[in-house]
C-alpha cells in the first residue's frame, strides 16, 4: 500500500487565498476479489490483495501478475472471462495532513469508474456509480482524518448485476453481439442496459473482455469557497476583420461572494487579449460571461485547405485579490455547418464545402487505460499521410482522451463524433435518459474547445436498426403496439431531444444529427436518397465488389472489406507453427460470423484472385482484394461529387491483433489498403471505370481554385506493345468532379483479348503524374499477367525495385520481420523503377534476407 503525503505548503497559505490543489491518486493500488463474491472460493489466490495499477482494469492486473494468460495471444480469450463475472475491490491508503483537512472542501474526483462502483473512505460510503462515461466527484472531507486513510472502491460485475433483471424480462431489449462463452443466454444481453463501452462485450472485430476497474485518472482536489467547475469560449461571429467570442465560466460556490473572473487569450502570433469582470456569486452553480474580441483572426482549416492556427485561453478566478483557480484550453476559430438540402449531406467549413475523405475509428485497445499518446499519434498521422481529412469516432466504444482531439486539432483532421451508442435498442425509462443527459453534457462541454470537432451524431445504427433490422421487427411484434410505442418514443426523446440539446447548449454552432445512418427524421434512413449510408451489400451481403459502382450515395459513412494483418503481426499472436486459413488460432482472431468469417475471405478470393501459393501469399492476396475493393468504391464516391460529399471506409485501426476490416493493424503496420488510400484520396485524382464495353474517365479535385492539367489513357498488350491512347488538356474544376470521356473498347484496345491487355489512366499536372490507375476488362484471376521480372537493388534500408514486365500490386513482404515500406501495393509498367525507404528495427542485412517481392502475376 502506498501513502500519499500532501504538500506542507498548504499549511502556510490562508484558506481563502489558497488555490485549488490537485493531488493525483494514480499509480500503485491493490485489488482482490470482493469477499462477498463466491468466486473467492474458486480463486483463493485472487481473494488476497495483489498489485493493481490505476488507471487500469482488473484484467490488466491479472495479466501483469501472471494469473491469467494474455487474451491477445493464441486462443487465450476464454481463460480470462471469469474476471468480468466477478466483483472486485480496489484499495489505496492516503496520508492526509491537517493542512489539507483545514480546506473547506476535499473532494475525490474519478474521471472514469467502470462501472457499478461503491466508494468508501475509512468504511464510510461516499459514492455509488452507474456510468463509465461520466466523471464522478464527491466531497470526502467528513470521512477523512489526519494521517492514514483507507480508500476502497468496490466494483460489481456488470453482467451479474444486471442479469437477474434481464432474465426475468420476457422480451429483453435487442442488443449487439451474443457472448460466445455461455455467460449470457443468446438474445438476453445485459449490455443494452448499461452505460459502458459496448465493444468490450465483443463485436465482429473485438474479443469479449468485460473490463472492471478505475479506468481513468483519480485525484484529490482541495479548495475553499469557490472553484471553476466549467469553462468554454463560444464563437458568436467570425469574419476576416474580427472574431467575437464569449467566455463563459461555471463557478461552484459555497455561498454569496464577490469574485473577479479573467480570461487571457494568446494568439498563434503571440498577441494577447485579456478581459475581466467582477461577479457576485450565490450558493451553487453560477454562470458568468464576458465578451472577447480578436482582431484579424486566423481561421483553423481542415488539412489540405489551410493552416491549423490555435489560440491559448487561460481562465482565472480571483478571490480576495489572489488567484484561487484557473483552467487552460486551446481553441480554434472556424465555422462548421451541415449541408442539408434536398437530401444532401456533407460538411461546410469556413464556408467551403469539404469532401470528407477518411475512415471510421474504433477503440485503440480492449483496455483503454493502456493506450499511450504515441499510439494515437501514429494512427492519426497515418490517416493524414493517406490524404484523409476526416475520422469518424464510432459509437460503440468510449469518448477518447483529450490528447486525441488535440492531435486532431494540430493535424487538421475533422472529427465526426458519435455519442456512445453502438446499435442496441435503448431503455425507455426516464432515469436512463437522465443518466445519459449528464454524460452528454459533460462530454460535449469537455470536447467543445477542439476545432477538429465538426459534428456530433447520436450513435451508431440504433435508429436504422430499429427501422430496418429483422430482429428488431420481430421484437416489435413480440412486445405489442403499446410497448413498441413506449420504446420508440423513448429513443426519439433521447436522440432528438436529450443529445441534441447537449450539443445545442454546450457546443453552439456545431452540427448534430440523431444517428448514423440518419436522415434527421426527414424520411427513411440508410438510403442513397437522403442522409448518410452504411453500405454492406459487399462483404456482409456477399455481393460482388462491383456493386459499389451501382449508385451515388449522399455520404457513405460506412463500407468495408476484410484482410489479414501483416504476417509479422500474425506471428506475434499465432506463433511460428504452420498456418492455414482455417487454423483454430486464426478463427479465434476472426470475429466476423463468430469465427467463421475467414470463409468470406475465401469466397472473395475465389471470386476475384488467383490461388495462393502458401500462407504468406494468402495474406498478400487478402490484402490485395481489400485494397482493390475499397479503392473501387472510394474513387467512385469521389467521382459522384456533388451528389456524394463523403467517403469513410470501415475501418482505420484495430482493437487487438485480428483479421478485420482495418487498413492499419493492431501493431501499427499498414495493410496494402492504407497505401492505396494515399493514392485514391489524393487531392487530385483520376477515376477510370470499365463497364459495358467502355471506360468512363472522371477527374476529381479538392483544390479551391482551377488547375490546368492533362489526362491520358494508354492501352497495352501484356508484352508492352501500345494498342491505343486518348488524351486531352483540361482545367480541373475547383471542389468538384467532372466527366472527361467515355471511350469504347474498340477505340482503345484495338480488338485485343481482354485477358491479355490493360490500360493505364493518368492525371498530369505540370507534366507530372499526380494520379494513376489500371484499367482491366477481366477479373484479376482471369488476366494473363506476364512474369514481372522484378529485381531489387539495396542501398542500406533503401531498395530500388525494377520491373521487366507489367507487375500488378507489388508487395514488399518481409515475412516475420516487422517493416514499414514508404510505398507498397503499387503497379509497375515494363521497365519502370521505384525506390522505397524501409523503416524497421531490423538491420539492413536482415531486411535484404527477409524480402520477398509478391505480385498478382506468376513468380
Image (tube, rainbow, N blue to C red):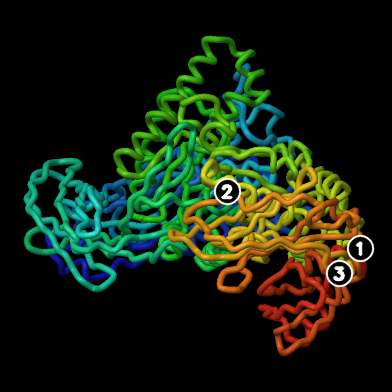
Taking the spot 69% from the left edge, 59% from the top edge, the residue there is: 673
Q: CA distance from mark 1 to mark 2?
A: 34 Å
Marks 3/2: CA distance?
A: 37 Å
Q: Nearer the viewer, residue 562 or 294?
A: 294
- Please name the residue shown 42% across and 35% down the image: 436
Disc assigned to residue 721: 3
Query: Residue 5: image x %, image y %?
Result: 33, 67
Residue 84 image offset from top left, x and y in percent: 62, 44
Circle 1 crowding by C-alpha within 10 Å: few under 14, some 14–19, many from 20? few
Decide: few, some or many residues near mark 2? Use Cα within 10 Å; few <14, some 14-19, many ≥20: many
Secondary structure under the numbered disc 1 in the rendered image: loop
Q: Which mark is first along the chain, 1 or 3? A: 1
Image quarter for residue 858?
A: bottom right
Q: Earlier in the sequence, mark 3 or mark 2?
A: 2
Task: Choose between 52 and 739: the one closer to the eye.
Answer: 739
The residue indicated by pointer 2 is 647
Quadrant assignment for the C terminus? bottom right
The quadrant in which residue 829 appears is bottom right
Q: Is residue 855 above or below residue 163?
A: below
The number of numbered discs placed on residues in the rendered structure image is: 3
Q: Is residue 358 left or right of residue 72?
A: left
Residue at the image position 90 percent from the left and 53 percent from the top: 782
Q: Nearer the viewer, mark 3 or mark 2?
A: 3
Examine the rendering and report whether any part of residue 412 can be seen: yes
Instruction: Kindly identify which residue carries mark 1.
Output: 614
Residue sitting nearer the eye, 387 or 437: 387
Q: Closer to us: mark 3 or mark 1?
A: 3
Residue 77: % across, % down: 73, 50
* Dot label at residue 576: none
Q: Quadrant of residue 70?
A: bottom right
Amino acid at each position: 500500500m502506498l501513502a500519499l503525503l500532501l504538500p506542507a505548503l498548504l499549511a502556510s497559505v490562508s484558506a481563502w487565498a489558497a488555490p485549488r490543489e490537485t493531488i493525483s491518486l494514480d499509480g500503485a493500488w491493490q485489488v482482490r476479489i470482493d469477499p462477498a463474491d463466491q468466486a473467492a472460493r474458486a480463486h483463493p489466490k485472487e481473494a488476497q490483495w495483489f498489485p493493481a495499477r490505476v488507471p487500469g482494469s482488473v484484467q490488466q492486473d491479472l495479466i501483469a501478475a501472471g494469473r491469467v494468460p494474455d487474451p491477445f495471444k493464441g486462443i487465450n480469450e476464454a481463460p480470462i472471462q471469469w474476471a468480468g463475472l466477478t466483483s472486485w475491490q480496489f484499495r489505496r491508503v492516503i496520508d492526509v495532513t491537517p493542512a489539507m483537512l483545514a480546506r473547506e472542501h476535499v473532494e475525490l474526483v474519478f474521471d472514469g469508474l467502470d462501472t457499478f462502483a461503491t466508494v468508501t473512505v475509512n468504511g464510510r460510503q461516499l459514492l455509488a456509480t452507474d456510468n463509465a462515461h461520466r466523471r464522478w466527484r464527491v466531497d470526502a472531507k467528513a470521512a477523512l482524518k489526519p494521517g492514514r486513510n483507507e480508500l476502497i472502491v468496490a466494483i460489481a460485475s456488470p453482467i451479474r448485476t444486471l442479469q437477474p433483471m434481464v432474465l426475468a424480462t420476457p422480451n429483453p431489449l435487442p442488443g449487439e453481439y451474443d457472448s460466445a462463452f455461455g455467460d449470457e443466454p443468446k438474445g438476453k444481453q445485459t449490455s443494452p442496459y448499461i452505460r459502458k463501452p459496448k465493444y468490450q462485450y465483443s463485436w465482429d472485430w473485438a474479443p469479449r473482455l468485460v473490463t472492471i476497474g478505475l479506468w481513468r485518472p483519480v485525484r484529490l482536489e482541495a479548495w475553499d469557497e469557490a472553484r471553476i467547475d466549467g469553462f468554454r469560449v463560444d464563437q458568436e461571429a467570425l469574419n476576416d476583420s474580427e472574431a467575437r467570442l464569449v467566455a463563459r465560466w461555471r463557478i461552484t460556490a459555497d455561498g454569496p461572494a464577490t469574485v473577479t473572473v479573467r480570461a487571457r487569450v494568446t494568439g498563434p502570433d503571440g498577441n494577447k487579449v485579456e478581459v475581466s469582470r467582477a461577479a457576485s456569486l450565490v450558493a451553487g452553480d453560477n454562470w458568468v460571461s464576458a465578451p472577447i474580441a480578436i482582431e484579424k483572426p486566423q481561421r483553423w482549416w481542415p488539412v489540405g485547405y489551410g493552416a491549423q492556427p490555435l489560440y491559448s485561453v487561460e481562465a482565472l478566478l480571483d478571490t480576495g485579490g489572489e488567484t484561487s483557480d484557473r483552467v487552460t484550453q486551446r481553441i480554434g476559430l472556424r465555422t462548421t455547418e451541415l449541408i442539408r438540402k434536398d437530401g444532401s449531406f456533407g460538411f461546410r467549413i469556413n464556408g467551403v464545402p469539404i469532401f470528407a475523405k477518411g475512415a471510421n475509428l474504433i477503440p485503440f485497445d480492449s483496455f483503454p487505460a493502456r493506450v499511450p499518446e504515441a499510439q494515437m499519434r501514429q494512427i492519426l498521422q497515418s490517416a493524414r499521410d493517406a490524404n484523409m481529412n476526416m475520422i469518424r469516432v464510432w459509437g460503440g466504444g468510449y469518448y477518447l482522451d483529450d490528447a486525441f482531439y488535440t492531435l486532431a486539432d494540430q493535424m487538421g483532421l475533422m472529427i465526426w463524433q458519435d455519442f456512445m451508442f453502438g446499435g442496441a435498442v435503448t431503455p425507455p425509462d426516464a432515469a436512463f435518459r437522465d443518466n445519459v443527459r449528464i454524460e452528454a453534457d459533460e462530454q460535449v462541454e469537455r470536447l467543445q474547445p477542439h476545432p477538429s470537432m465538426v459534428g456530433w451524431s447520436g450513435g451508431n445504427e440504433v435508429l436504422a436498426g430499429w427501422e430496418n433490422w429483422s430482429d428488431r421487427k420481430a421484437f416489435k411484434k413480440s412486445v405489442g403496439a403499446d410497448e413498441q410505442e413506449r420504446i420508440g418514443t423513448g429513443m426519439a426523446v433521447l436522440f432528438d431531444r436529450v443529445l441534441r440539446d447537449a450539443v445545442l447548449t454546450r457546443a453552439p454552432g456545431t452540427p448534430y444529427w440523431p444517428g448514423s445512418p440518419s436522415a434527421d427524421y426527414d424520411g427513411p434512413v440508410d438510403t442513397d436518397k437522403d442522409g448518410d449510408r452504411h453500405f454492406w451489400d459487399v462483404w456482409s451481403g456477399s455481393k460482388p465488389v462491383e456493386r459499389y459502382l451501382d449508385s451515388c450515395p449522399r455520404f457513405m459513412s460506412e463500407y468495408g472489406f476484410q484482410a489479414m494483418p501483416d504476417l509479422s503481426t500474425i506471428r506475434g499472436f499465432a506463433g511460428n507453427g504452420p498456418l492455414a486459413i482455417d487454423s483454430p488460432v486464426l478463427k479465434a482472431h476472426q470475429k466476423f460470423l463468430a469465427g467463421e468469417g475467414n470463409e468470406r475471405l475465401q469466397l472473395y478470393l475465389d471470386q476475384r484472385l488467383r490461388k495462393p501459393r502458401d500462407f504468406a501469399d494468402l495474406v498478400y492476396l487478402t490484402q490485395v482484394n481489400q485494397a482493390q475493393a475499397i479503392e473501387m468504391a472510394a474513387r467512385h464516391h469521389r467521382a459522384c461529387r456533388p451528389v456524394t460529399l463523403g467517403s469513410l471506409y470501415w475501418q482505420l485501426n484495430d482493437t487487438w491483433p485480428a483479421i478485420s476490416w482495418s487498413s492499419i493493424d493492431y501493431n501499427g503496420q499498414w495493410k496494402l489498403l492504407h497505401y492505396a488510400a494515399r493514392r485514391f484520396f489524393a487531392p487530385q485524382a483520376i477515376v477510370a471505370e470499365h463497364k459495358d464495353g467502355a471506360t468512363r474517365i472522371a477527374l476529381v479535385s479538392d483544390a479551391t481554385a482551377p488547375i490546368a492539367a492533362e489526362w491520358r489513357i494508354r492501352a497495352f498488350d501484356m508484352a508492352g506493345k501500345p494498342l491505343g491512347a486518348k488524351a486531352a488538356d483540361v482545367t480541373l474544376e475547383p471542389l468538384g468532379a467532372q466527366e472527361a470521356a467515355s471511350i469504347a473498347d474498340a477505340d482503345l484496345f484495338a480488338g485485343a483479348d481482354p485477358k491479355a491487355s490493360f490500360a493505364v489512366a493518368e492525371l498530369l499536372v505540370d507534366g507530372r503524374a499526380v494520379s494513376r490507375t489500371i484499367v482491366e476488362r477481366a477479373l484479376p484471376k482471369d488476366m494473363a499477367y506476364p512474369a514481372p521480372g522484378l529485381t531489387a537493388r539495396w542501398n542500406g534500408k533503401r531498395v530500388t525495385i525494377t520491373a521487366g514486365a507489367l507487375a500488378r500490386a507489388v508487395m514488399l513482404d518481409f515475412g516475420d520481420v516487422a517493416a514499414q515500406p514508404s510505398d507498397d501495393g503499387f503497379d509497375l509498367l515494363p521497365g519502370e523503377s521505384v525506390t522505397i525507404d524501409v523503416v524497421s528495427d531490423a538491420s539492413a542485412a536482415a531486411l535484404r534476407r527477409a524480402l520477398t517481392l509478391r505480385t498478382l502475376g506468376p513468380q
